[in-house]
Amino acid sequence: MLSVINGLGSCTPYQVRQNFLSSRSREWSGSAGAVYPAIRRMHAGGLLRAQKTEDGRRSVRFSLSAAGRRAFDAWIKDVERACGSGLDPFRCRADQWDLLPAIERRALLQALRRKLEQRLATLGDLLERPDIEERRALVLEIELHKTRLRWLERESARP
Amino acid sequence: MLSVINGLGSCTPYQVRQNFLSSRSREWSGSAGAVYPAIRRMHAGGLLRAQKTEDGRRSVRFSLSAAGRRAFDAWIKDVERACGSGLDPFRCRADQWDLLPAIERRALLQALRRKLEQRLATLGDLLERPDIEERRALVLEIELHKTRLRWLERESARP
DNA sequence: GTGCCCATGTAATCTGTTACATGATTAG
DNA sequence: CTAATCATGTAACAGATTACATGGGCAC
């Protein structure tokens, strides 16, 4: 998945790490202990090309090698995986919620709706900002959350 | 996440494993090297209660202890995590697709649409079967895939 | 009995996490 | 100069994967 970051140019490990840290993903911590070894592995595996840049710092910049670009391309075009359902923390819980006693269930669904609406507001604000990257993914995420919200509303109005 | 399986009754490690193997999740292999140690850990941590059942086999059945049920409850009611965006393989790629040359991009979006429609057909068939468990999650998954499909159609008709 | 499947594991390996360590540069 | 921060790591640990090992019951 580091391919994604490296897909955006020639950069130092530190920049890669910052990118992970700043991306509000929560599913990936971007910890030093993950990023640096991963880059070393990819370099050893021939997916990255290193180029010494003599700009004062001893920093080494990495970019995708031909093999790296091929691997990235294969990842992008992996239709099978792309259309899988992933590991959705909302969907994972969906059937469990139904087992709760009616009162708890009602309260929980309510809390979920509030949280989703709040999240949608935040994402909507983000969308306004001109400097935001990954705009398409953001639009999609908003739509997916709206779908979850509709599902919740349908679930709330039930036996 | 094993809480989910254990939430469905008193069972042997083997049954847990079969459940994982049969659930078309792909995000979790249910390998022996994961399930057995995990159960041992949870038992050691006091989340599981073991009961020897003398039904011939030496099988030990596990069920949730009081602490285990509390942990499961906390997981179910984790609104924050539930409303996070998870690790969606489709959304992850969404912005990368836009970087492809127009012809490749068009072909890929087409392939994705076909795949999604096929997946939707499969899930629709599943929904017909009366013995299917996790029905709510299935309905939700279908809706989410439809949302992705709508997004794709909007993306296909673009500059 | 022999072979096969059921059920339970262990070993080696890979990768991610947290927490700590280190040298280089910049602010005061 | 000293302290903070930048940039790069390492160490210990947790958990997942594959592949292999083991032992009991059943079919033939």
Image: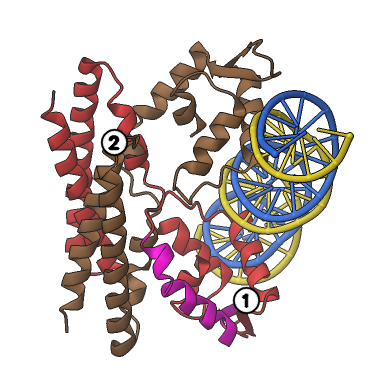
Chain colours: A brown, B red, C blue, D yellow
Q: Residue at x 58, y 78 (%)?
A: B62
> To which quarter of the image does residue A81 belong?
top left
Residue A88: give its label: none
Q: Quadrant of residue B126?
A: bottom left
Residue A12 falls left or right of residue B5: right
Between A138 and B134, the residue placed more toward the observer is: A138
> Does B57 appear above or below A75?
below
Q: Is residue B65 magenta?
A: yes
Foreground disc of the pair 2, 1:
2
C-alpha span from label 2 to label 1: 65 Å
* Chain under numbered label 2: A
* Identity of the residue furthest to the left in this view: B157
Q: Secondary structure at mark 1?
A: loop
Q: Tell me: A100 left or right of B71.
A: left
Residue A105 higher or lower than A51, as above or below:
below
To which chain does the residue with label 1 belong? B
Amino acid type assigned to the residue bearing label 1 in the image: Arg
- What residue do we see at 21% from left, 44% from top? B148
Question: Eyeballing the image, is B93 above or below B38?
Answer: above
Q: Residues within 10 Å of mark 2 (few under 14, many from 20)?
A: few
Write the start and end of the magenta stretch as one range.
B61-83
Picture coordinates of residue A102, whole percent (x, y): 28, 88
Q: Judge by depth and name the residue closer to the eye, A113 or A97.
A: A113
Q: Nearer the viewer, residue A110 or B52?
A: A110
Residue A90, horizontal then vertical, whole percent? 35, 62
Q: Quadrant of residue A111?
A: bottom left
Label of residue A130 in the image: 2
Q: Is residue A23 above or below residue B73?
A: above
Q: Is residue B65 visible?
A: no
Residue behind mark 1: B57
Residue A116 in magenta?
no
Q: Tell me residue A48's x, y (percent).
A: 57, 18
